[in-house]
Image: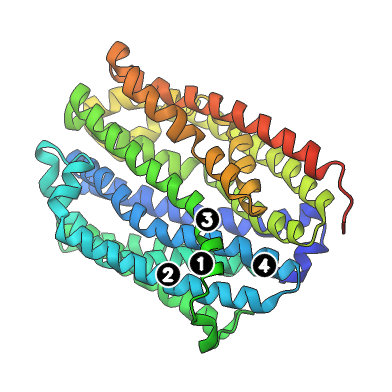
Amino acid sequence: MAVSSTELGTLSIKDLLIKQSVPASIGILFMSVNILIDTIFVGQWIGSLAIAAVSVVLPITFLISSLGMALGIGGSSIISRALGANNREKALHTFGNQILMTLGLALISVFGGLFYSDEVLLLFGANGAIMEPAKEFFIPVLYGVPFLALCMMGNTVIRAEGKPKFAMIAMIIPAFSNIILDIVFIKLLNWGMFGAALATSISYFMCFAFILWFFIFKSELRLHLKHYLLDFKIISEITSLGFVTFARQGVVAILSIILNHTLFVYGGEHSVAVYGIISRMLMFALFPILGVTQGFLPVAGYNYGAKKYVRVSESISTSIKWAGVLATIIFLVILVLAEPIVAVFSNDADIIKETPNALRIVFAASPIIAIQLIGAAYFQAAGKAIPALLLTLTKQGFFLIPLILVLPNYYGIFGVWISFPIADILSTIVTAFFLKREMNRKLTHAQDGI
Protein backbone atom coordinates (compact mmCIF):
# COMPACT_ATOMS: atom_id res chain seq x y z
CA MET A 1 0.00 0.00 0.00
CA ALA A 2 1.04 3.56 -0.62
CA VAL A 3 2.08 5.71 2.32
CA SER A 4 -0.26 8.61 3.07
CA SER A 5 1.35 11.97 3.82
CA THR A 6 0.49 11.78 7.55
CA GLU A 7 2.14 8.34 7.91
CA LEU A 8 5.48 9.92 7.00
CA GLY A 9 5.52 11.24 10.56
CA THR A 10 4.25 8.13 12.38
CA LEU A 11 5.52 4.89 10.80
CA SER A 12 8.95 3.56 11.77
CA ILE A 13 11.84 5.05 9.81
CA LYS A 14 12.92 1.64 8.51
CA ASP A 15 9.42 0.84 7.23
CA LEU A 16 9.11 4.27 5.65
CA LEU A 17 12.46 4.05 3.91
CA ILE A 18 11.59 0.61 2.54
CA LYS A 19 8.18 1.78 1.32
CA GLN A 20 9.65 4.93 -0.21
CA SER A 21 13.01 3.65 -1.46
CA VAL A 22 12.06 0.31 -3.00
CA PRO A 23 9.53 1.78 -5.48
CA ALA A 24 11.91 4.70 -6.17
CA SER A 25 14.74 2.23 -6.82
CA ILE A 26 12.58 0.12 -9.12
CA GLY A 27 11.49 3.22 -11.02
CA ILE A 28 15.08 4.45 -11.40
CA LEU A 29 16.10 0.91 -12.40
CA PHE A 30 13.60 0.87 -15.26
CA MET A 31 14.60 4.38 -16.33
CA SER A 32 18.27 3.32 -16.27
CA VAL A 33 17.54 0.07 -18.11
CA ASN A 34 15.72 2.14 -20.70
CA ILE A 35 18.80 4.33 -21.27
CA LEU A 36 21.07 1.29 -21.11
CA ILE A 37 19.14 -0.75 -23.68
CA ASP A 38 18.74 2.33 -25.87
CA THR A 39 22.53 2.61 -25.93
CA ILE A 40 22.93 -1.12 -26.64
CA PHE A 41 20.45 -0.93 -29.51
CA VAL A 42 22.09 2.08 -31.19
CA GLY A 43 25.55 0.58 -30.62
CA GLN A 44 24.69 -2.84 -32.05
CA TRP A 45 22.23 -1.78 -34.77
CA ILE A 46 23.64 1.60 -35.88
CA GLY A 47 27.29 1.65 -34.73
CA SER A 48 29.72 2.92 -32.08
CA LEU A 49 29.54 6.42 -33.58
CA ALA A 50 25.85 6.45 -32.64
CA ILE A 51 26.82 5.87 -28.97
CA ALA A 52 29.05 8.94 -29.15
CA ALA A 53 26.20 10.97 -30.71
CA VAL A 54 23.74 9.95 -27.99
CA SER A 55 26.37 10.81 -25.35
CA VAL A 56 26.53 14.34 -26.77
CA VAL A 57 22.77 14.87 -27.04
CA LEU A 58 21.45 13.41 -23.78
CA PRO A 59 23.20 15.95 -21.47
CA ILE A 60 21.53 18.74 -23.48
CA THR A 61 18.03 17.28 -23.18
CA PHE A 62 18.59 16.39 -19.52
CA LEU A 63 19.74 19.96 -18.84
CA ILE A 64 16.49 21.35 -20.25
CA SER A 65 14.28 18.73 -18.60
CA SER A 66 16.14 19.20 -15.31
CA LEU A 67 14.27 22.48 -15.03
CA GLY A 68 11.28 20.29 -14.23
CA MET A 69 13.27 18.15 -11.82
CA ALA A 70 14.68 21.26 -10.12
CA LEU A 71 11.28 22.89 -9.72
CA GLY A 72 9.85 19.53 -8.70
CA ILE A 73 12.40 18.86 -5.95
CA GLY A 74 12.39 22.48 -4.79
CA GLY A 75 8.60 22.58 -4.65
CA SER A 76 8.32 19.08 -3.18
CA SER A 77 10.55 20.11 -0.27
CA ILE A 78 8.04 22.88 0.43
CA ILE A 79 5.08 20.52 -0.07
CA SER A 80 6.53 17.87 2.30
CA ARG A 81 7.17 20.44 5.02
CA ALA A 82 3.79 22.11 4.45
CA LEU A 83 1.98 18.78 4.78
CA GLY A 84 4.05 18.01 7.88
CA ALA A 85 2.97 21.36 9.35
CA ASN A 86 -0.68 20.69 8.28
CA ASN A 87 -0.65 23.66 5.86
CA ARG A 88 -2.45 22.06 2.88
CA GLU A 89 -3.24 25.37 1.18
CA LYS A 90 0.43 26.24 0.85
CA ALA A 91 1.10 22.77 -0.59
CA LEU A 92 -1.62 23.28 -3.22
CA HIS A 93 -0.45 26.77 -4.17
CA THR A 94 3.14 25.51 -4.45
CA PHE A 95 2.10 22.73 -6.82
CA GLY A 96 0.15 25.10 -9.05
CA ASN A 97 3.12 27.43 -9.31
CA GLN A 98 5.41 24.48 -10.09
CA ILE A 99 3.31 23.50 -13.10
CA LEU A 100 3.29 26.96 -14.66
CA MET A 101 6.99 27.54 -14.08
CA THR A 102 8.00 24.15 -15.50
CA LEU A 103 5.93 24.47 -18.65
CA GLY A 104 7.02 28.04 -19.36
CA LEU A 105 10.75 27.49 -18.86
CA ALA A 106 10.79 24.19 -20.78
CA LEU A 107 9.11 25.72 -23.83
CA ILE A 108 11.50 28.67 -23.87
CA SER A 109 14.49 26.31 -23.65
CA VAL A 110 13.20 24.09 -26.45
CA PHE A 111 12.69 27.03 -28.83
CA GLY A 112 16.24 28.17 -28.06
CA GLY A 113 17.58 24.66 -28.68
CA LEU A 114 15.82 24.43 -32.05
CA PHE A 115 16.99 27.85 -33.19
CA TYR A 116 20.64 27.30 -32.20
CA SER A 117 20.86 23.53 -32.73
CA ASP A 118 24.21 23.48 -34.54
CA GLU A 119 25.88 25.81 -32.06
CA VAL A 120 24.54 23.86 -29.07
CA LEU A 121 25.67 20.50 -30.47
CA LEU A 122 29.15 21.82 -31.23
CA LEU A 123 29.39 23.26 -27.73
CA PHE A 124 28.54 19.89 -26.19
CA GLY A 125 31.18 18.07 -28.23
CA ALA A 126 29.62 17.01 -31.55
CA ASN A 127 33.04 17.13 -33.20
CA GLY A 128 34.00 15.54 -36.49
CA ALA A 129 31.82 12.67 -37.67
CA ILE A 130 29.68 12.85 -34.50
CA MET A 131 27.75 15.93 -35.70
CA GLU A 132 25.53 14.31 -38.33
CA PRO A 133 24.04 11.49 -36.20
CA ALA A 134 23.87 13.82 -33.18
CA LYS A 135 21.71 16.32 -35.06
CA GLU A 136 19.50 13.56 -36.44
CA PHE A 137 18.86 12.41 -32.85
CA PHE A 138 18.67 15.86 -31.23
CA ILE A 139 15.81 17.55 -33.11
CA PRO A 140 13.08 14.91 -32.64
CA VAL A 141 14.03 14.37 -28.98
CA LEU A 142 13.81 18.10 -28.32
CA TYR A 143 10.09 18.11 -29.14
CA GLY A 144 9.48 15.61 -26.34
CA VAL A 145 11.50 17.46 -23.70
CA PRO A 146 8.59 19.61 -22.32
CA PHE A 147 6.72 16.38 -21.55
CA LEU A 148 9.84 15.00 -19.86
CA ALA A 149 10.21 18.17 -17.79
CA LEU A 150 6.60 17.94 -16.59
CA CYS A 151 7.11 14.24 -15.80
CA MET A 152 10.22 14.93 -13.72
CA MET A 153 8.42 17.68 -11.83
CA GLY A 154 5.27 15.64 -11.26
CA ASN A 155 7.17 12.54 -10.16
CA THR A 156 8.79 14.32 -7.21
CA VAL A 157 5.41 15.71 -6.12
CA ILE A 158 3.89 12.21 -6.20
CA ARG A 159 6.64 11.02 -3.82
CA ALA A 160 6.12 14.08 -1.59
CA GLU A 161 2.50 12.94 -1.18
CA GLY A 162 3.74 9.60 0.11
CA LYS A 163 2.68 7.60 -2.99
CA PRO A 164 5.97 6.18 -4.29
CA LYS A 165 4.37 3.25 -6.15
CA PHE A 166 2.63 5.62 -8.55
CA ALA A 167 5.95 7.44 -9.04
CA MET A 168 7.52 4.05 -9.80
CA ILE A 169 4.86 3.22 -12.42
CA ALA A 170 5.41 6.62 -14.04
CA MET A 171 9.07 5.70 -14.58
CA ILE A 172 8.35 2.15 -15.77
CA ILE A 173 5.89 3.19 -18.51
CA PRO A 174 8.38 5.16 -20.68
CA ALA A 175 11.04 2.47 -20.20
CA PHE A 176 8.84 -0.29 -21.63
CA SER A 177 7.42 1.88 -24.40
CA ASN A 178 10.84 3.16 -25.49
CA ILE A 179 12.32 -0.35 -25.68
CA ILE A 180 9.40 -1.65 -27.76
CA LEU A 181 9.43 1.39 -30.05
CA ASP A 182 13.22 1.12 -30.46
CA ILE A 183 12.81 -2.41 -31.78
CA VAL A 184 10.07 -1.28 -34.19
CA PHE A 185 11.67 1.96 -35.41
CA ILE A 186 15.37 0.98 -35.47
CA LYS A 187 15.40 -2.77 -36.12
CA LEU A 188 12.22 -3.41 -38.11
CA LEU A 189 11.73 -0.10 -39.96
CA ASN A 190 15.45 0.74 -40.16
CA TRP A 191 14.91 4.42 -39.30
CA GLY A 192 18.33 4.75 -37.62
CA MET A 193 18.98 7.68 -35.29
CA PHE A 194 15.65 9.32 -36.21
CA GLY A 195 13.84 6.14 -35.10
CA ALA A 196 15.72 6.11 -31.79
CA ALA A 197 14.81 9.76 -31.21
CA LEU A 198 11.16 9.27 -32.14
CA ALA A 199 10.85 6.32 -29.75
CA THR A 200 12.32 8.45 -26.96
CA SER A 201 9.94 11.38 -27.52
CA ILE A 202 6.84 9.17 -27.66
CA SER A 203 7.89 7.46 -24.41
CA TYR A 204 8.17 10.88 -22.71
CA PHE A 205 4.60 11.68 -23.77
CA MET A 206 3.28 8.37 -22.45
CA CYS A 207 4.86 9.06 -19.07
CA PHE A 208 3.25 12.52 -19.04
CA ALA A 209 -0.17 11.01 -19.85
CA PHE A 210 0.05 8.70 -16.82
CA ILE A 211 1.13 11.48 -14.45
CA LEU A 212 -1.71 13.69 -15.71
CA TRP A 213 -4.14 10.84 -15.00
CA PHE A 214 -2.72 10.46 -11.47
CA PHE A 215 -3.20 14.11 -10.55
CA ILE A 216 -6.72 14.18 -11.95
CA PHE A 217 -7.99 10.99 -10.29
CA LYS A 218 -5.63 9.82 -7.48
CA SER A 219 -3.82 12.78 -5.97
CA GLU A 220 -4.51 14.43 -2.60
CA LEU A 221 -3.53 17.72 -4.22
CA ARG A 222 -6.72 18.75 -6.01
CA LEU A 223 -5.98 22.08 -7.66
CA HIS A 224 -8.37 24.93 -8.40
CA LEU A 225 -7.77 27.98 -10.60
CA LYS A 226 -6.70 30.10 -7.62
CA HIS A 227 -3.77 27.79 -6.97
CA TYR A 228 -2.26 28.66 -10.38
CA LEU A 229 -1.96 32.34 -9.48
CA LEU A 230 1.73 33.14 -9.26
CA ASP A 231 2.88 33.81 -5.70
CA PHE A 232 6.31 35.40 -5.80
CA LYS A 233 7.16 34.36 -2.25
CA ILE A 234 6.50 30.72 -3.15
CA ILE A 235 8.28 31.15 -6.50
CA SER A 236 11.32 32.51 -4.67
CA GLU A 237 11.35 29.56 -2.26
CA ILE A 238 10.88 27.01 -5.05
CA THR A 239 13.63 28.67 -7.09
CA SER A 240 16.13 28.87 -4.23
CA LEU A 241 15.69 25.19 -3.36
CA GLY A 242 15.27 24.03 -6.96
CA PHE A 243 18.35 25.92 -8.02
CA VAL A 244 20.35 23.30 -6.12
CA THR A 245 19.18 20.58 -8.51
CA PHE A 246 19.41 22.76 -11.61
CA ALA A 247 22.87 23.97 -10.66
CA ARG A 248 23.95 20.34 -10.24
CA GLN A 249 22.59 19.45 -13.68
CA GLY A 250 24.10 22.62 -15.10
CA VAL A 251 27.48 21.59 -13.73
CA VAL A 252 26.91 18.09 -15.18
CA ALA A 253 26.28 19.76 -18.54
CA ILE A 254 29.51 21.76 -18.25
CA LEU A 255 31.28 18.56 -17.23
CA SER A 256 29.89 16.83 -20.32
CA ILE A 257 31.18 19.65 -22.53
CA ILE A 258 34.68 19.46 -21.01
CA LEU A 259 34.70 15.64 -21.03
CA ASN A 260 33.59 15.27 -24.64
CA HIS A 261 36.11 17.82 -25.91
CA THR A 262 38.94 16.39 -23.75
CA LEU A 263 38.19 12.82 -24.81
CA PHE A 264 38.04 13.85 -28.48
CA VAL A 265 41.43 15.60 -28.21
CA TYR A 266 43.17 12.63 -26.54
CA GLY A 267 41.33 9.73 -28.18
CA GLY A 268 38.96 10.93 -30.92
CA GLU A 269 35.40 9.68 -31.47
CA HIS A 270 36.48 6.31 -30.06
CA SER A 271 37.07 7.66 -26.53
CA VAL A 272 33.80 9.61 -26.57
CA ALA A 273 32.04 6.30 -27.26
CA VAL A 274 33.94 4.64 -24.36
CA TYR A 275 32.66 7.29 -21.97
CA GLY A 276 29.19 6.87 -23.47
CA ILE A 277 29.19 3.29 -22.16
CA ILE A 278 30.65 4.28 -18.78
CA SER A 279 28.12 7.07 -18.26
CA ARG A 280 25.24 4.67 -18.98
CA MET A 281 26.64 2.24 -16.42
CA LEU A 282 26.88 5.08 -13.89
CA MET A 283 23.17 5.75 -14.41
CA PHE A 284 22.26 2.07 -14.31
CA ALA A 285 24.47 0.50 -11.64
CA LEU A 286 23.86 3.14 -8.98
CA PHE A 287 20.05 2.90 -9.16
CA PRO A 288 19.62 1.42 -5.63
CA ILE A 289 21.66 4.22 -4.04
CA LEU A 290 19.72 6.86 -5.96
CA GLY A 291 16.50 5.10 -4.94
CA VAL A 292 17.43 5.26 -1.25
CA THR A 293 18.25 8.96 -1.71
CA GLN A 294 14.90 9.65 -3.39
CA GLY A 295 13.08 7.68 -0.69
CA PHE A 296 14.94 9.58 2.02
CA LEU A 297 13.90 13.04 0.78
CA PRO A 298 10.14 13.02 1.65
CA VAL A 299 10.76 11.19 4.93
CA ALA A 300 13.36 13.72 6.08
CA GLY A 301 11.43 16.71 4.69
CA TYR A 302 8.11 15.80 6.34
CA ASN A 303 9.66 15.07 9.75
CA TYR A 304 11.81 18.18 9.62
CA GLY A 305 8.66 20.23 8.91
CA ALA A 306 6.93 18.49 11.84
CA LYS A 307 10.01 19.25 14.03
CA LYS A 308 10.57 15.56 14.71
CA TYR A 309 14.33 15.90 14.62
CA VAL A 310 15.17 12.56 16.21
CA ARG A 311 13.33 10.85 13.33
CA VAL A 312 15.25 13.00 10.85
CA SER A 313 18.56 11.94 12.41
CA GLU A 314 17.53 8.28 12.31
CA SER A 315 16.54 8.58 8.65
CA ILE A 316 19.98 9.99 7.81
CA SER A 317 21.99 7.26 9.55
CA THR A 318 19.79 4.42 8.28
CA SER A 319 19.84 5.70 4.69
CA ILE A 320 23.63 6.06 4.67
CA LYS A 321 24.06 2.55 6.11
CA TRP A 322 21.77 0.91 3.56
CA ALA A 323 23.08 2.87 0.58
CA GLY A 324 26.69 2.17 1.59
CA VAL A 325 26.16 -1.59 1.65
CA LEU A 326 24.43 -1.49 -1.75
CA ALA A 327 27.20 0.65 -3.26
CA THR A 328 29.86 -1.81 -2.08
CA ILE A 329 28.03 -4.74 -3.69
CA ILE A 330 27.73 -2.78 -6.95
CA PHE A 331 31.46 -2.01 -6.97
CA LEU A 332 32.34 -5.71 -6.50
CA VAL A 333 30.06 -6.69 -9.40
CA ILE A 334 31.71 -4.09 -11.68
CA LEU A 335 35.16 -5.24 -10.57
CA VAL A 336 34.48 -8.86 -11.53
CA LEU A 337 32.19 -8.51 -14.56
CA ALA A 338 33.52 -5.44 -16.39
CA GLU A 339 34.51 -7.33 -19.57
CA PRO A 340 31.20 -9.12 -20.23
CA ILE A 341 29.29 -5.93 -19.37
CA VAL A 342 31.19 -3.93 -22.00
CA ALA A 343 30.84 -6.68 -24.63
CA VAL A 344 27.06 -6.23 -24.52
CA PHE A 345 27.33 -2.68 -25.84
CA SER A 346 29.64 -3.01 -28.83
CA ASN A 347 31.53 -5.40 -31.08
CA ASP A 348 34.29 -2.83 -31.66
CA ALA A 349 37.60 -4.46 -30.61
CA ASP A 350 39.18 -1.18 -29.44
CA ILE A 351 36.18 -0.31 -27.25
CA ILE A 352 36.09 -3.83 -25.76
CA LYS A 353 39.82 -3.53 -24.97
CA GLU A 354 39.83 -0.06 -23.37
CA THR A 355 36.48 0.26 -21.59
CA PRO A 356 36.63 -2.43 -18.81
CA ASN A 357 39.64 -0.97 -16.96
CA ALA A 358 38.27 2.56 -17.38
CA LEU A 359 34.95 1.35 -15.94
CA ARG A 360 36.67 -0.16 -12.88
CA ILE A 361 38.63 3.04 -12.24
CA VAL A 362 35.57 5.30 -12.50
CA PHE A 363 33.65 3.11 -10.00
CA ALA A 364 36.61 2.67 -7.61
CA ALA A 365 35.30 5.00 -4.85
CA SER A 366 31.61 4.12 -5.21
CA PRO A 367 31.37 2.34 -1.79
CA ILE A 368 31.61 5.72 -0.01
CA ILE A 369 29.39 7.91 -2.21
CA ALA A 370 26.29 7.30 -0.05
CA ILE A 371 27.58 9.83 2.48
CA GLN A 372 27.84 12.52 -0.18
CA LEU A 373 24.44 11.84 -1.75
CA ILE A 374 22.43 11.52 1.49
CA GLY A 375 24.28 14.44 3.10
CA ALA A 376 23.48 16.83 0.26
CA ALA A 377 19.89 15.52 0.10
CA TYR A 378 19.35 16.21 3.82
CA PHE A 379 20.09 19.93 3.47
CA GLN A 380 17.73 20.11 0.50
CA ALA A 381 14.95 18.26 2.38
CA ALA A 382 15.41 20.64 5.32
CA GLY A 383 15.01 23.68 3.06
CA LYS A 384 18.61 24.87 3.56
CA ALA A 385 19.36 25.99 0.05
CA ILE A 386 22.91 27.35 0.36
CA PRO A 387 24.60 24.35 2.03
CA ALA A 388 22.55 22.03 -0.19
CA LEU A 389 23.83 23.87 -3.26
CA LEU A 390 27.45 23.89 -2.18
CA LEU A 391 27.49 20.22 -1.17
CA THR A 392 25.69 19.18 -4.34
CA LEU A 393 28.33 20.91 -6.44
CA THR A 394 31.36 19.55 -4.57
CA LYS A 395 31.99 16.47 -6.70
CA GLN A 396 31.41 17.70 -10.26
CA GLY A 397 31.95 21.42 -9.80
CA PHE A 398 34.67 21.89 -7.19
CA PHE A 399 36.70 18.73 -7.81
CA LEU A 400 35.93 16.71 -10.95
CA ILE A 401 35.97 19.54 -13.52
CA PRO A 402 39.32 20.98 -12.29
CA LEU A 403 40.83 17.50 -12.15
CA ILE A 404 39.78 16.74 -15.74
CA LEU A 405 41.20 20.05 -16.89
CA VAL A 406 44.57 19.29 -15.26
CA LEU A 407 45.31 15.54 -15.05
CA PRO A 408 44.98 14.60 -18.78
CA ASN A 409 47.76 17.07 -19.53
CA TYR A 410 50.09 14.74 -17.62
CA TYR A 411 48.46 11.31 -17.87
CA GLY A 412 46.38 11.45 -21.08
CA ILE A 413 43.13 9.44 -21.10
CA PHE A 414 44.07 7.75 -17.80
CA GLY A 415 43.97 11.21 -16.22
CA VAL A 416 40.30 11.49 -17.19
CA TRP A 417 39.32 8.17 -15.61
CA ILE A 418 41.29 8.61 -12.38
CA SER A 419 39.67 12.02 -11.83
CA PHE A 420 36.34 10.34 -10.96
CA PRO A 421 37.36 8.38 -7.81
CA ILE A 422 39.56 11.24 -6.59
CA ALA A 423 36.56 13.61 -6.85
CA ASP A 424 34.34 11.06 -5.05
CA ILE A 425 36.76 10.79 -2.12
CA LEU A 426 37.26 14.56 -1.74
CA SER A 427 33.56 15.41 -1.99
CA THR A 428 32.64 12.70 0.53
CA ILE A 429 35.13 14.07 3.06
CA VAL A 430 33.70 17.59 2.72
CA THR A 431 30.07 16.42 2.95
CA ALA A 432 30.78 14.19 5.96
CA PHE A 433 32.25 17.15 7.84
CA PHE A 434 29.24 19.43 7.30
CA LEU A 435 26.66 16.68 7.86
CA LYS A 436 28.27 15.63 11.15
CA ARG A 437 28.35 19.23 12.34
CA GLU A 438 24.68 19.74 11.40
CA MET A 439 23.61 16.56 13.18
CA ASN A 440 25.49 17.57 16.34
CA ARG A 441 24.12 21.12 16.35
CA LYS A 442 20.55 20.74 15.09
CA LEU A 443 19.41 17.15 15.36
CA THR A 444 21.21 15.21 18.11
CA HIS A 445 20.41 17.60 20.95
CA ALA A 446 16.98 18.66 19.74
CA GLN A 447 13.77 17.26 21.22
CA ASP A 448 10.92 16.18 18.98
CA GLY A 449 8.11 18.71 18.77
CA ILE A 450 10.24 21.66 19.82
Tell me, for residue 235, which label it has, or none.
1
Q: Secondary structure at mark 3?
A: helix
In the rendered structure, which disc, 4 or 1, sits on the residue that comes first in sequence?
4
In the rendered structure, which disc, 3 or 2, sits on the residue that comes first in sequence?
2
On the image, numbered disc 4 is attached to which residue? 162
Q: Nearer the viewer, mark 1 or mark 2?
A: 1
What whole-number distance in Å separates the C-alpha atoms at marks 3 and 2? Answer: 13 Å
Question: What's the amino acid at mark 3?
Answer: Ser
Q: Residue at x 30, y 18 (%)?
A: 408
The answer to whether the residues at label 1 and label 2 have Cβ atoms under 8 Å apart is: yes
In the rendered structure, which disc, 1 or 2, sits on the residue that comes first in sequence?
2
On the image, numbered disc 3 is attached to which residue? 240
Q: Residues within 10 Å of mark 1 (few under 14, many from 20)?
A: some
Residue 55 percent location from the top left of the image: 28, 43
Residue with the most extreme right position: 447
What whole-number distance in Å separates the C-alpha atoms at marks 2 and 4? Answer: 23 Å
Name the one closer to the observer, 9 or 288.
9
Q: Nearer the viewer, mark 3 or mark 2?
A: 3
Q: Quadrant of the N terminus?
A: bottom right
